[in-house]
Image: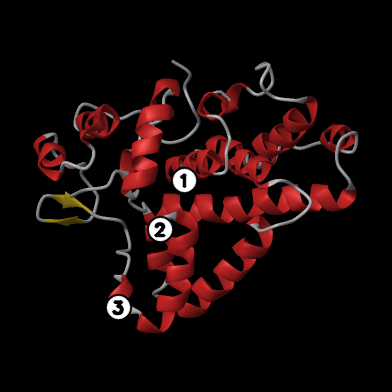
Amino acid sequence: MIELPGEAPASNLESTNRERVYATGSWRDRDSIAAAQVPVRPGRKQKGETILANVEPLRVEDVPELASLIGQVSAAMGFVPNSLLTMARCPEIMRGFTQLVTAVLGPGEIAADLKLLVAHVGSTAAGCRYCQAHTAGAAARFGVEVDKIEAAWQFETDIRFSASERAALRLARDAALVPIATTPEHFLELRRHFSENQIVELVAVIAIFGWLNRWNDTMATQLEDEPMRFACQHLAGRGWQAGKHLPWP
């Protein structure tokens, strides 16, 4: 099993059993998930026996002034992300963020499928399990083959990746590290495949997900059912675990 960057592997007090419930197809059965629960980790905010995010997301009905914007996000993604509902506590931050992310991930000179692979590899390098799940599921929705998503961390050697994709994903991996590990050689290789404008788009994707990686890892944002299911089924084989992002019934 390939060890990914990020938080330490789950201990026997954590959530491996509940993740297995998602991966084996009973992920919608809340009784099954509850039956697989194990003791909570010390030091986390708790409500009864439930692990909560460090800052609780609002409900959609709590912010009627944002209902239209949240509805647009839900229509695009197929669900309302908890990260957005946490941002909704500061409506101007949420409005500004959605405007920026729409500009970065919306139509441009770089295809959406490559943008999402860049976001996924960058999030993997940064260690954010929440964003890894989101970007993997989104890449699949935009037509990237599942086996290619599963192999994304091996882009340097996997034959499914072209030279141009390798250049972009190498930038994503090394720009997401702290300290940043990019060099002039990264850009020499990028210019063999991409224009200056396209390189700006690629860096913008890496940068917006750098923001999201820190937001969701710091907030311990809980995963929603759809990305949780996809990650358990398609990313767990390479070492992915939800960890602090594990949803509770």
Tag 1's secondary structure? helix
Which amino acid, by three-letter code, is at mark 1?
His
Left or right for 159, reference 35: right
Which amino acid, by three-letter code, is at mark 3?
Asp
Asked whether disc 2 touches disc 1, contact meaning CB atoms under 8 Å apart, the reply is: yes
The residue that label 1 is drawn on is 134
Please give the name of the residue rendered at 65% of the width and 35% of the height, measured from the top-left corner. Answer: 173
Which mark is drawn over residue 81? 2
Which of pointers 3 and 1 lies earlier in the amino acid sequence? 3
**Residue 38 sits in quarter:** top left
Tag 2's secondary structure? loop
Render colour scheme? secondary structure
Which of pointers 2 and 1 lies earlier in the amino acid sequence? 2
Which mark is drawn over residue 10? none
Which amino acid, by three-letter code, is at mark 2?
Pro
Q: How many marks?
A: 3
Q: Residues within 10 Å of mark 1 (few under 14, many from 20)?
A: many
Q: Residues within 10 Å of mark 2 (few under 14, many from 20)?
A: some
Rendering coords of residue 120 (x, y %): 56, 39
Rendering coords of residue 56 (x, y %): 29, 64
Left or right for 189, reference 86: right
The residue that label 3 is drawn on is 62
